[in-house]
Amino acid sequence: MKSSNNERPQKASKLFKLSLLASMYLCQAIPLGYVFGSLPVILREQGVNLKAVGAIFALHLPWALKFLCASWVDRKYIPALGRRRSWILPLQWSGAAVLVCVSYFPPSADFGIMYGLLLLLSCVMATNDIAVDGYATDILEEEERPWGNSIQSAARFAGLMLGGGVMLFMNSNFGWQPLCLFLAAAVFSFSLPVLFHREIDPLITVPADKESSGEGVWAFIKKREVLRVLPILIAPTAFAFTSVQMRTPLLVDMGFDSRSVGTILMHCAYPAGLAGTFLSGWFLHRVGGRVFLRVFCSTVILLAAYTVFVACSGVIPYWQAALLLSIDNILIGAVMVWSFTLMMKVSAGKNAGTGFAVLSSLFIIIPMACGPVLGHVGDLLGMEGLYILLGLLCFAGFMVAEFAGRHEGRVGAARMVEFPG
C-alpha cells in the first residue's frame, strides 16, 4: 500500500516487526503442526496403513501450487485494510472456522470428509502464506532478514510444539473434538495482532501507475539469479523432508504410542529444533554455505543408514528415539533459515509474494508428490527398504548440489549462496 504524498511513511521498530511476524507465522504453524505432526501418529495408532498416512503428506499440494494465485494476491487488495492485511486477516479467521468444522468429523468415522476439510484448510493457509511472506519481504531491511527468517522458522517449531505435541496429549486425554476446537481458538487468538495493527509501509515503493502490474511466474523463474540457485536450493533437501516425516510412524510400529511420541516431540525434538534455528545463522556464516550443505546432507544420509539399522533390529531405546527426532528437527530448522533467507533475497521487490511463493512451492513439491509413493514403498518393502531408498536419493541430491555449487563458484554467483543473509 503506497503512502500518499501528505503522509509520512509509517516506520516500525525491529522488535515490533519481528513480534508481528511471529504471531502471523504461529497462526499457520499451529494447524500445520497438527496436520503433519499429530495426525500421522493418530492415524497409525488407529491402524491406518502407510499409504493413507502418506496421503496426509499430500496435503502439502496447495502449498506446492500456491504460485498459481500468488500474482493475484500481490495485485488485489482493499486499500482501507492494506495490501497484505486484506488477505491475511480474513484467511486466518477462515482457517479457524474450518477447524471448527473438522471437529465434527473424526478420522475413524468420516475419513473422507475430514480429509476434504483438511485439504480446504491447507488451501486457506497456503494462500495466507503468500501474503505473510510477501509482507515479511516488504518490511524487513536486508540486515533484518536473517532474524526475520529465524523468527519464521522458530515460530514454526513453536507451532509444532502446540500442534504436534500438545495436540497428541489432548487426543489421548480429551478426544478429537476438544482437540480441534482448542486448535481453532489458538488460531483465532494469534490473528488478533493483525487485526489491531496498521499495515506497515513497504521499504520498496511502487509508482502508482505500476501498482496493478505483476510479474508472471515464468518471467520470475527465467531470471538468471533464480536459475542459478534452484539446484542448490532444492536438490539437497528434496528427500530429507520425507525421511523426517516417516520416522514418527516408524516409532509407532516399534511400540511407541501417541502419548510417548508427543512427549519426545514436545520435550526434546521441537525445543532442539527451536534452539537449532537460532544457532543455524551463526553456523552458516561461520563455515559458509558449501560446508553447511555438506554437513546437512551427510547427517541426513547417516540418519537414514541408522534408521535402516533400527528398523532391522526392531527395537530402539527411548533416549535414542528422542535423540533421533531431535537431530531431525535441528536439521530442518537450520536448512529452513538458510533457504528462506535465500528465497527472500531473490524475491525482494514489488512482487515479493509471487517470487517467494514460486521458490517455496518448488522447495516442497518433490517431497509432497513423492509422499504417497514412498509410503506405498514402505508398505511393500518395509521401513528397511524405504530408508535404503531414501538414503540413496539423499546422496544423489547431495551430488547434484555439490556439482551446482562448484559451477556457481566458477561463474561468480557462489557468494550469494554462501551468505544468503
Image (cartoon, rainbow, N blue to C red):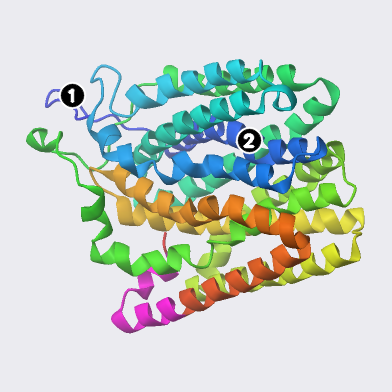
| Residue 413: in magenta span | yes
What percent of the width, then of the height, locates residue 18?
A: 48, 38
Picture residue at 50% right of the left edge, 75% below the top:
290
10 Å neighbourhood of mark 1: few (<14), some, or many (≥20)? few
Q: Circle 2 sits in a helix, a strand or a loop, which is it?
A: helix
Q: Quadrant of residue 172?
A: top right
Picture residue at 74% right of the left edge, 63% below the top:
381
What percent of the width, then of the height, locates residue 286?
A: 54, 70
In the rendered structure, the answer to whether residue 236 lies left or right of residue 377 reads left
| Residue 22: in magenta span | no
The foreground one among 220 and 202 is 220
Q: Which mark is residue 118?
A: none
Residue that numbered label 1 is attached to:
7
Q: Which residues are magenta?
A: 403-419
Picture residue at 60% right of the left edge, 44% below the top:
57
Location of the C terminus by quadrant is: bottom left
In the rendered structure, the answer to whether residue 28 lies left or right of residue 295 reads left
Disc nearer the start of the sequence (2/1): 1
What amino acid type is highlighted by mark number 1? Glu
What amino acid type is highlighted by mark number 2? Val
Residue that numbered label 2 is attached to:
35
